[in-house]
Image (spheres, helix red, strand yellow):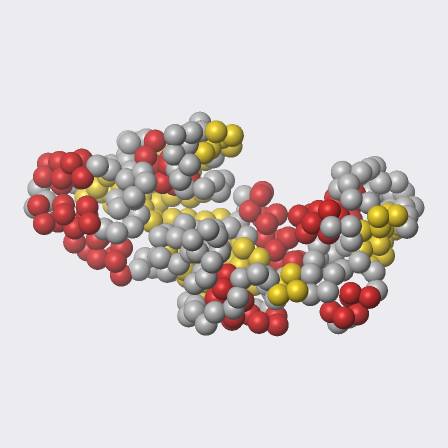
Amino acid sequence: MTDSDQSKEPLRFVIDEVNAGQRLDKAVAALADGFSRSRLQGLIQSGALRLNGLVCADASHKVSRGSVVEIVIPPLEEAAPQPEDIPLDIVYEDEHLLVINKPAGLVVHPGAGNVSGTLVNALLYHCGESLSGIGGVARPGIVHRLDKDTSGLMVVAKNDQAHQGLAAQLEDRSLSRVYQALVLKVPVPVKGCVDMPIGRDARNRLKMAVKGQSAKAARTHYRVLKAYGEAFSLVECKLESGRTHQIRVHMQAIKHPLIGDPLYGPQDTAVRAAAKKAGYDGEIAQKLIDFPRQALHAQVISFMHPVSGREHRYEVDAPQDFFNLLKML
């Protein structure tokens, strides 16, 4: 079916016994292959769904067995972000998804102050016509994000089926992400779990905080990979949840902030004192202080392919700037 056909012919579903009594969006998501609930909620709110011949704009409406649902797919529109020819380091790609190695400094999604030059702009250019148009918008499916100055692996969906499958894995924690971070001092114990809810910092809207506003559960498993005396350590962090700035907030909360972190990082005096105590000279301490970003790299990502069901695992080395820090130490 072409996009023009989709805009003329509504998709039709009949509520069966299994889905009777469910919310409208949940029931249709179960019957309509390739539609996520969030996409369906947008269509419902826009008046694109009819229930037994009448427009129904209530996604929470409980449906009955035998009810007829029709979805009118709007014509495909170009997403607000514009395609831009920005180089991508692609680790894997097929017709459903791609895995990229994001460089530090690249913003993932357009927003205030970053309307262009983002990963989404690059993906729109790279993927072109292969992107899904379900819901009337051509856009890549950003399943999870990396902070602007965090480097490493991300998986991106090209169509709604892949997005829905990957998002489900993110929710049930089967999509695994492992990071490396250079932190102040050496955590004790050297292996553990930080289990602290994270929410918006009430005093600084740019920051997150443990037990902040509307805090949600967050767990980070860590283990020390290498200690540099008692001054610094390379730590592996595995996310069990995916809150904004999670690793950065959790490591600061246990008094081992990330080197170079502009929001949660250690004071210059703390870096100098730790370096001096471990026998590092002042020049090394200054280079650590001057590191222009949080020393955080998404090294490993693993997931089940949402269409083929095959297990995928990818690993990439930290970029040169991070490597140079470790080599110096």
Residue at x 82% of width, y 37% of height:
62
Q: Is residue 70 left or right of residue 264?
A: right
Residue 236 x, y percent position in the rendering? 35, 45
Tell me: residue 303, above or below residue 243: below
Q: Position of residue 188 (x, y in %)?
A: 28, 31
Q: Position of residue 187 (x, y in %)?
A: 28, 34
Q: How many marks?
A: 0
Q: Which residue is drawn at the image coordinates 18% and 35% (left, top)?
A: 270
Q: Position of residue 268 (x, y in %)?
A: 18, 39
Q: Residue at x 58, y 42 (%)?
A: 172
Specify whether 293 is left or right of 231: right
Residue 84 in the image: above or below residue 311? below
Left-right relation of 303 to 75: left
Using the image as rendered, state which of residue 208 and residue 297 is in the foreground.
208
103 or 110, which is in the foreground? 110
Task: Decide if residue 193 is in sight here.
Answer: no
Is residue 212 visible in this depiction of the protein? yes
Query: Residue lying furthest top in this view?
Result: 211
- Quarter of the image that includes the N terminus: bottom right
Identified at 80% across, 51% down, the residue is 49
Residue 199 vs 141, above or below: the answer is: above
